[in-house]
Image (spheres, rainbow, N blue to C red):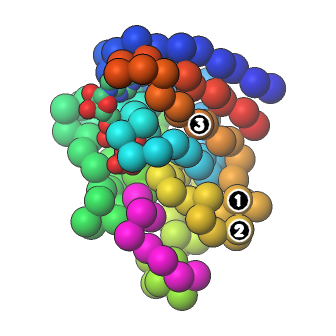
Amino acid sequence: MLREVLTHSAEETIAFGRALTELLTPPKLVLLRGDLGAGKTTLVKGIAAAFEAAAEEDVTSPTFTLVHEYRGARANLYHIDLYRVDTPRELETLGLDDLRSEGSILLIEWGEKFPRLLRARDVEISLEREGESGRKIRVCC
Ligand SMILES: Nc1ncnc2c1ncn2[C@@H]1O[C@H](COP(=O)(O)OP(=O)(O)OP(=O)(O)O)[C@@H](O)[C@H]1O
Ligand SMILES: [Mg+2]
């Protein structure tokens, strides 16, 4: 299955994230791919809101803490940023496997650096810049 859209603002990307609930029913491991500033974290705002796990404005980048947890009525979301994680050993210390459960959705930025996560992923969403505020978003699973 492949879905592709072009958004023209952060708000449109958030709205697209809100529309992904059916595709992302837990349990899921989702890789979010795209350059710095592509809109991965912005997309998570919409996903978290739709699962009633967090308000859009409360979703911020887990750049330093690496994992943000949002417990919601419809799913437990774990938003993970592996930009600063360099080795498989460091990845293991995060214990991501322990977060995987019936009710959980792992949304992972920069996870494609690790073959193990590429193999384990259920869904992949890639974001690509098109000009200043255009983003081509592709969903595949
Ligand atoms: N169409 C769009 N979709 C998403 N974000 C957009 C769009 N147009 C402009 N932006 C802006 O681009 C930025 C995207 O930042 P965001 O933190 O979501 O990127 P990211 O992919 O998570 O980057 P990083 O890898 O650094 O974590 C935001 O400032 C957002 O307002
Ligand atoms: Mg981000």
Residue 135 against residue 92 in the figure, above or below: above
Q: Which mark is residue 126?
A: 3
Q: Residue at x 27, y 66 (%)?
A: 65
Q: Residue at x 59, y 15 (%)?
A: 5
Mark 2 touches mark 3? (CB < 8 Å): no
**Residue that extends furthest to the bottom in the rendered view of this protein:** 89
Q: Gap between marks 3 and 1, in whole Å?
A: 13 Å
Residue 10: tell me if it is visible. Answer: yes
Q: Quadrant of the N terminus?
A: top right
Q: Secondary structure at mark 2?
A: helix
Foreground residue among 102 and 32 = 32
Q: Reading the chain from its start, which is encountered first: label 3 or label 1?
A: 1
Q: Secondary structure at mark 3?
A: strand
The boundaries of the magenta stretch are 81-88
Q: Quadrant of the C terminus?
A: top right
The percent position of residue 129, horizontal first and vertical second, equals 47, 28
Q: Residue at x 60, y 37 (%)?
A: 125
